[in-house]
Image (cartoon, coloured by chain):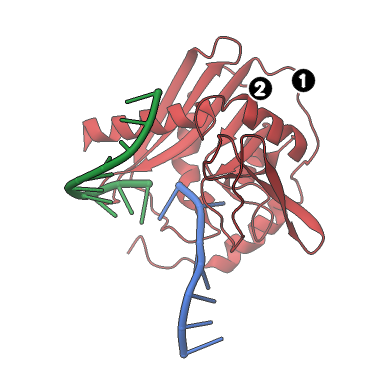
Chain colours: A red, B blue, C green
Amino acid sequence: MSSLSPNLKLYLHEQKKLSERVILEDCINAVNLVAGVDVSYSNDGKYACAVIIVLDAETREVCEQVHSIGIPDFPYVPQFLAYREMPLVSEAYCQLSRRPDLFFYDGNGTLHAQKCGAASHFGVVFDVPVIGCAKNASTSITRISGNRGDHSPIIENGTVLGEQLVTQNGVKPLYISVGHKISLKRSIQETLNFAPDYRLPEPIRQADHLSRSILKSIY
DNA sequence: GCGACAG
DNA sequence: ATCTTGTCGC
């Protein structure tokens, strides 16, 4: 009975309030420490593992890695991913001894029905700069194809919510949007900067690998 | 009614 | 998200 449909209206209201607090401008200087946030699930979908990895932006070496394992009490509901992931992500976040200058979150920021996806939710709650980085579109968008650096804005009612961004030649684009305290332009720039060899930015890629391996060794 | 729907 | 087999490519 933990996975029955929750009262979404309450959460919808909270998302609207949180979205008013999202800052779309750059509130960062130099990025010395960059982090990646990701959550993986066990085969049966019962257990989840949230990981935050911190890299030295210069050397790309891992400075710190924290994680939290548990059983999500909120089901996966499109547009409400934050409520499923935040408990574990928060537990991981509170274990960080260092304060990253920028976070990459595996999910949407303002590219969201309420302009407050999980990346923005995380950013506003902890008041940190975040880039929302999703591997799939949450809306029916015509996917672009091209070479590294190509991008195309995703617009709704005259507002740019995010951008499709090709990080590697001929590879499916990523869906980038502002999480919090960073501009969309800078988000594109930083994503390309931290995704020199693979489709995903290195912080998310490594967080993804670690969370999977941790779950594998435990379940 | 039908299809779409981050992780 | 996760399950799957083979296949192409560095």
Viewer-closest of A115 and A16: A115
Q: Amino acid at mark 2?
A: Asp
**Position in image of residue A37 (x %, y %):** 50, 34
Which quarter of the figure is the N terminus of chain A placed in?
bottom left
Callouts 1 and 2 in the same chain: yes
- Horizontal side of residue A210 vs A161, given as left or right: left
Q: Give residue A206's quadrant in the image.
A: top left
The residue that label 2 is drawn on is: A101
Q: Which quadrant of the figure has residue A201?
A: top right
Of mark 1 and mark 2, the one earlier in the sequence is 1
Q: Mark 1 near mark 2, Cβ–Cβ under 8 Å?
A: yes
User: Residue at point 77% right, 52% down?
Assistant: A160
* Mark 1 secondary-structure assignment: loop
Q: Is residue A113 left or right of residue A88?
A: right
At a point 54% along the width and 66% down the height, the residue shown is: A8
Kindly state the secondary structure of the residue where label 2 is placed.
Answer: loop
Residue B7, position in %: x, y? 45, 47
Q: How many marks?
A: 2
Q: Is residue A129 above or below residue B1?
A: above
Residue A3 vs residue A195, the one in the foreground: A195
Is residue A149 something that shows in the picture?
A: yes
Amino acid found under the numbered disc labelled 1:
Asn
Residue under label 1, please give it.
A29
Q: Is residue A80 above or below residue A121?
A: below
Using the rendered view, name the quadrant where residue A51 is placed.
top left
Q: Residue at x 81, y 37 (%)?
A: A25
Q: Determine if residue A122 is in view.
A: no
Please state the horizontal and vertical placement of residue A197, each as a whole percent of the image: 51, 25
